[in-house]
């Protein structure tokens, strides 16, 4: 044993300094005694003859510094002021905190460049750059539009040098396309990010799924901007070399992006078939999102092929494990948009029989997906769609209903409803709330939000 009390957990200390301080304060104060002779760190921890419990005051400065590495950056200063020795041991962490504070207030390309240069000169460990850089990413959209591109590149390249968390910073940057309103600028940044992604070692975490999503910011190819198809083909060709998880993320994205091609592009059926083949090679535990996306996009195929393709996707979805069936159902009904009313009624009735298979944890997303089909079906089917979709939320409460309605608004579904369908929708929502015994204040909150729910998405 190390001479530590039985309730002392060093692992907990290293991951939760507040819990350790509380435990420390609860211990009785040791009687004053002559200090023991100095020992090497390894000897002090390994001395089996130690009789008294180890307290915070006994910890070497390097251990205190190590504990400080786990302290959230916003709590660094309160921890550092525990005592003078802690303040000294936390010197580097306090420096990181000061950079983080400056990053949160950065307003210009110059101030960001200066901060990054200082960090490069003073923080030897790349992992120490993470928190200030995360704060700088949040400042990107506050910069002048002329500066955003250069700052994006600087941050993206700096993140490339951080072994573990750097790729998470790069992913966050790629998911902020609204900061770049100029498509030509975005093309340059996309090319820059793609080049750095290629430099990562095979098997390392990478940004390929985020780059695939970034293709949505390209316009349909024109003689002036013939770039979308080029990048689409590049990411599609990379699929076989990626992990199962990455493929499972990218295949649905590339499927939805088929609508970026011109409607008469002869490659669409070929690309659809290729994506179908890639999806079929995934293990069933990863197929749900791809199957749902493929079903939702059958309308892009020649009209004569659509019913058979949809039936194939529906049967495939039903054959999946329950959790993957729930994921597929989020997009599956969208594929019925171009079908006759008779075909729509038949398919929706079939899907209703399997709603109970959706796991509880996926029911809000599945409900939103099922209800989404209301904007292209007639009033009778739309009413049934609301009833069946909301039935997935029985017993789930106000928060679940609000989540579904908010998602429908965000996707523009509610905004597209005419007055007649909107009145019917509110009737079904009210009936659902009463059947689930929502409180009157809860019902009023939903009903009073009707104007916002029906407004154009932010």
Image (spheres, helix red, strand yellow):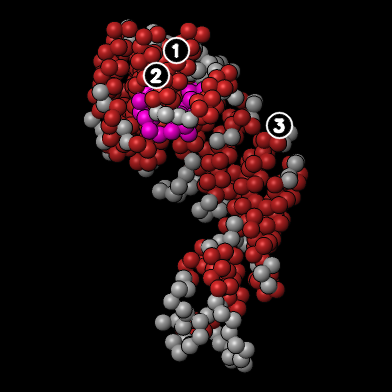
Q: Is residue 229 above or below residue 304?
A: below
Residue found 55% across the figure and 37% down from its top: 174
User: Residue at the location (47% across, 73% down)?
Assistant: 8
Q: Nearer the viewer, residue 138 or 71?
A: 71
Within 10 Å of disc 1 (Cα), the crowding (few <14, some 14-19, many 20+) is: some
Residue under numbered circle 2? 386
Residue 364 at x, y = what percent?
41, 31
Q: Quadrant of residue 98?
A: bottom right
Element on which disc 1 rests: helix
Find out whether residue 392 is within the magenta segment: yes
Mark 1 vs mark 3, CA separation in Å: 45 Å
Q: Is residue 187 visible?
A: yes
Few, some or many residues within 10 Å of mark 3 (<14, 14–19, 20+) = few
Quarter of the rendering containing residue 330: top left
Q: Earlier in the sequence, mark 2 or mark 3?
A: 3
The residue beneath circle 3 is 145
Query: From which residue to which does the magenta span run?
Result: 389-411
Dots 2, 1 in contact, CB < 8 A: yes
């Amino acid at each position: 044993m190390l001479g530590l009390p039985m309730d002392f957990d060093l692992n907990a200390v290293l991951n939760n300094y507040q819990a350790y301080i509380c435990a420390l304060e609860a211990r009785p104060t040791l009687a004053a005694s002559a200090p023991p002779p100095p020992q090497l760190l390894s000897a002090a921890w390994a001395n089996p003859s130690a009789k008294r419990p180890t307290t915070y005051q006994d910890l070497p400065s390097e251990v205190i510094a190590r504990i400080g590495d786990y302290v959230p950056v916003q709590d660094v200063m309160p921890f550092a002021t525990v005592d003078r020795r802690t303040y000294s041991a936390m010197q580097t962490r306090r420096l990181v905190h000061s950079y983080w504070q400056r990053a949160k207030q950065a307003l210009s390309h110059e101030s960001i460049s200066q901060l990054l240069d200082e960090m490069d000169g003073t923080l030897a460990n790349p992992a120490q750059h993470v928190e200030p850089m995360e704060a700088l990413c949040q400042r990107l959209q506050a910069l002048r539009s002329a500066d955003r591109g250069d700052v994006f590149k600087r941050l993206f390249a700096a993140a490339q040098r951080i072994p573990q968390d750097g790729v998470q910073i790069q992913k966050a940057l790629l998911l902020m396309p609204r900061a770049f309103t100029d498509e030509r600028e975005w093309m340059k940044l996309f090319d820059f990010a793609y080049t750095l992604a290629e430099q990562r070692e095979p098997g390392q975490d990478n940004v390929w799924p985020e780059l695939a999503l970034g293709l949505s910011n390209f316009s349909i190819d024109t003689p002036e901007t013939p770039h979308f198809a080029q990048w689409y083909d590049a990411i599609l060709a990379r699929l076989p070399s990626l992990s199962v998880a990455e493929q499972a993320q990218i295949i649905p994205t590339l499927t939805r992006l088929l609508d970026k091609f011109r409607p008469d592009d002869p490659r669409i059926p070929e690309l659809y078939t290729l994506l179908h083949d890639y999806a079929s090679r995934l293990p069933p535990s990863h197929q749900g999102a791809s199957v749902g996306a493929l079903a939702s996009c059958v309308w892009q195929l020649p009209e004569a092929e659509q019913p058979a393709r949809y039936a194939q996707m529906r049967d495939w979805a039903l054959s999946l494990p329950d959790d993957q069936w729930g994921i597929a159902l989020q997009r599956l009904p969208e594929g019925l948009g171009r079908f006759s009313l008779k075909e729509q009624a038949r398919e929706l009735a079939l899907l209703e029989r399997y709603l109970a298979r959706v796991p509880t944890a996926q029911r809000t997303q599945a409900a939103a997906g099922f209800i989404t089909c209301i904007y292209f079906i007639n009033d009778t089917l739309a009413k049934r769609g609301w009833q069946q979709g909301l039935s997935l939320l029985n017993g789930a409460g106000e928060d679940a209903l609000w989540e579904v309605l908010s998602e429908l608004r965000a996707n523009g579904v509610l905004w597209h409803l005419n007055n007649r369908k909107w009145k019917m929708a509110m009737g079904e929502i009210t009936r659902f709330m009463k059947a689930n015994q929502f409180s009157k204040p809860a019902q009023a909150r939903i009903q009073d939000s009707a104007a916002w729910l029906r407004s154009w998405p932010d």
